[in-house]
Amino acid sequence: MAHDSFIELVKSLSGGDMISINAGEGQEPFHIQRTLLTNSSPWFDKALSDHFNEGQDRTLRFPGTSATVVQIFIFWLFNKELPLRDILTDLCRVESRGPSESEIQTLAVRVWIFGEEHMLPRLQNQAMRELHNSLAMGFPTSETIKEAYEGSAPGSVLRRKLIREAVAGWKLAADKGNPDTIGFRSNELDHLSGVAGFLVDFATELGKYAADFRIKDPDESGAAAYYVSNEKGMT
């Protein structure tokens, strides 16, 4: 890998006496310079001020966020790049296998949501690019879409991107005459029927086909249509 090894960097941050980042139960804390964190986003700048518990006890906790996402954030904080496929390849090597597209897509969604929660638009946009590239290799699963809907607001660019891909996959399956074996399968819709907002978004997007609306992004540059504004972040 051209950049520092993801696993080596994560391990190297397990000691020190700066801001402690608790990556989850059973995980060794990481120690990061306060300035590096506060300069990365207004969220960290506020959270690490003396007016908040995190600033007073010099510890950050991310309840509900997986240790992998926290570790990826730390890697990104130092490298300012997000090679999710390479990172997952490193992690999967322990199991002697390569990452699946659904794993890459789900991880990209989780990182995007983390960026949204902590006002890190550059991280979000890099996660969107990784998601876009992976979606060119395969349609999203119902589990990936479910996580996106549960972790993002109605109308978010993350929802818009995934709903377009889901509808495109469903349309491909219908055109092939076998909706259960190709594209976005009909049983995926069943799994998502209880997810708030999904069916309305799906029906709305599907209706655009009636006007011969082109839905698939032609190339990688299409990812930029789903970027968030950099105005809310500091990096």
Image: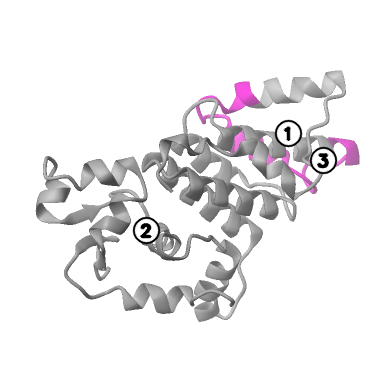
Q: In the rendering, at what x and y percent does residue 8 appear?
A: 42, 79
Q: Residue at x 29, y 61 (%)?
A: 23
Q: Is residue 194 above or below residue 221?
A: above
Q: Residue at x 23, y 41 (%)?
A: 46
Q: Secondary structure at mark 2?
A: helix
Residue 103 occupies which quadrant of the picture? Answer: bottom right
Residue 68 occupies which quadrant of the picture? Answer: bottom left
Q: In the rendered structure, which amino acid carries the disc numbered 3?
A: Ala
According to the picture, the residue beneath numbered tag 3 turns out to be: 173
Q: In the rendering, at what x and y percent does residue 210 appear?
A: 84, 19
Q: Is residue 178 magenta?
A: yes
Q: Is residue 143 magenta?
A: no
Mark in the foreground, 1 or 2: 2
Q: In the rendering, at what x and y percent does residue 90 appear?
A: 53, 75
Q: In the rendering, at what x and y percent does residue 45 appear?
A: 26, 45
Mark in the foreground, 1 or 3: 1
The earlier-in-sequence mark between 1 and 3 is 1
Which label number is shown at residue 70?
A: 2
Question: 193 or 95: nearer the eye?
Answer: 95
Colour theme: one colour
Q: Which residues are magenta?
A: 173-201
The earlier-in-sequence mark between 3 and 2 is 2
Q: Quadrant of the N terminus?
A: bottom right
Residue 99 occupies which quadrant of the picture? Answer: bottom right
CA distance separating discs 3 and 2: 37 Å
